[in-house]
Image (spheres, coloured by chain):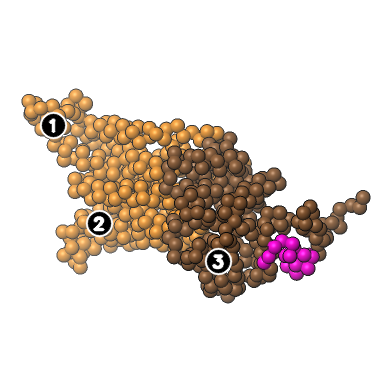
Chain colours: A brown, B orange
Amino acid sequence: MSAVIEARGLSKRAGRATLLDGVGLTVEAGEMVAIIGPNGAGKSTLLRLLSGDLRPSQGEVRLKQRDISSYAPRELAARRAMLSQHINVTFPFTVEEIVLMGAGERSAREAGALVDAALDEVGLTHFRERQLPTLSGGEQQRTHFARVLVQLACGEAEHGPGLLLLDEPTSSLDLRHQIDLVEAARRRAAGGTAVIAILHDINLAIRFADRLIVLNGGRLAADGPRADVVTRETIRDIFEIDAVVHQADGGVPYVLPQSMRARVPPR
Amino acid sequence: MSVATGTNARSPRRVGGGRRFTSIAIPLLLALLAATALAALTVGAAGIPLSRLPAALGFAGTTTADAMTARDQLVLWSIRIPRIAATAMVGGLLAAAGAIMQGLFRNPLADPALVGISSGGAFAAAAAIVFTDSRFGQTLHFLQTELLPLAAFAGSLTATAILYGVSSRGGRTSIAIFLLAGVAITAIANAGIGMLVFIADDRQLRDITFWLLGSMSGATWNKAALLAPVLVIGLAACAYIARGLDLLVLGEADAFHGGVDVERLKRISIVMVSAMTGVAVSISGVIGFVGIVVPHLLRLVIGPTHRLLLPASVLLGAILMVGADTLARTIVAPAEMPIGILTAAVGAPFFLGILLRQRGLASL
């Protein structure tokens, strides 16, 4: 196993506010990591630092044993792919044209098979000629996921296992497509990709990842296997709610917030 | 919010994309440009029927060297052909500058004339006229023809830089601030032009008025020769930035994630928009709406992919400008209507139409 990405002592300040304070982590090839934490914990900031889009105020990020700021944008794009939240496309690009953007300089003919496979994987083959602005939020999110998958595949074909960063990839998706997306990401990890995703749904995060990273107030609150991290005490400390943690099949924990359970009428 | 979501001026349920013309778009536009130019050659204050055209162009041998042919040749080679060439290039530059700007600001309503970039160029050009005529600048008077495009470029560049600086923050461009900043820049440039009008003498006043209305009547071979290199460099730059502009539609951060050097893309785009607009303005004066109408029409037919949109904009911009200029010099012949009046009279209602359509979409 080799580290795909390593971060040491990452801090990010904006004006007087400290968004992130001394966070360090290492993610190996084939690992699946979920980042959880309350609003404003610094999750998106951490992901943007790991993507090379933001520069840290302190600390360093190394992607494949090289300082991330030493890569040119195109070199970086061949080694890490990132799906952001809230992408608003103002021109009438079709689904197919958006997905093809992931293929870089490759022509539609060269990347055709990759585009077809990605569209099939997100279940949008029948929408390929539809204009993106006419689709629902969830369908647009799946289109961008397909674009990111094409970018990842193009990069990994040349440089081996890369890094896949997902910022709340399931925020607009219905239950079925949440599971589809999570499984697509798992397949990438099984192929050697290092996957890091921010997830709001803690149960989805537990299902999705073998390892959880908990951020709170810009600091690393916990980092480890899901069974160690997901305890009643952690949930209470981080999210300030009371919750029951159950063990499902195979020892996978799941979290039931207390206040929600109280609303369920007794049988 | 309604502005942001309503900017896709397309029917919401159009399946299939309507991308049937992508492979033949460029040849078709080239043929159309040739036909328009041919028509423009024949009409004007001195009419040259199609039957006399080959002889006048020198294609029909030397046997017909009569007085009529000599007159036709003079009209064509020293007046009409340079004017058509310059008009076509101005149209191409303005339309391509509009398309690049819309890609840069991710906003189909961006137009160099609408947000003060043309006005900035016109102000600088007018200042150059007054300065080189003044006692202080008289030593530079012989350079006036060369100085005007440079001044216009500098004025356009300043306006674009201010516009981007004001309306972009943290990688996001606010459409409302962008348009309002454009209004402010236009007002500043117009105040400067008003000041110049106030201090100018009669002859300078006529030159400055020409910039404000927009006209191709001053086109000569020299001016066409100034436009050509900018157009060639512009086309080369278009090929270089096309893919980056496509990805920029995702936003600056996501274009970067996709491998685009966003800062370099923005620098090249801003310099190109300013050079293309500035040089066009220095020849033709302020001509609005070409940069907004042409890319919009093309996106409806061939889609928004810049690799095709930018060269197609150059061609359709040339076609529309040559057509409009031909109309401008025949509609009130032997007098001439300033072409800027014509493009505004046609373009502004078109622009309102886009807004109406978007309003309809936004309220859905």
Which residue sits furthest top?
A: B51
Relative horizontal placement of residue A31, taking residue A157 as reference (left or right): right
Instruction: Check disc 3 and report the residue beneath it.
Output: A6
Q: Position of residue A246 (x, y in %)?
A: 81, 58
Visible in this render: residue B9? no
Q: Nearer the viewer, residue B187 or A247?
A: A247
Residue A16 highlighted magenta (yes or no): no
Q: Position of residue A250 (x, y in %)?
A: 77, 54
Q: Amino acid at mark 3?
A: Glu
Q: Residues within 10 Å of mark 2 (few under 14, many from 20)?
A: many
Secondary structure type for disc 3: strand
Instruction: Check disc 1 and report the residue beneath it.
Output: B58
The numbered disc on residue B148 is: 2
CA–CA distance in space, label 2 to label 3 = 55 Å
Q: Residues within 10 Å of mark 1 (few under 14, many from 20)?
A: few
Q: Amino acid at mark 1?
A: Gly
Q: Residues within 10 Å of mark 3 (few under 14, many from 20)?
A: many
Q: Residue at x 59, y 70 (%)?
A: A24
CB-based contact (under 8 Å), mark 1 and mark 3: no
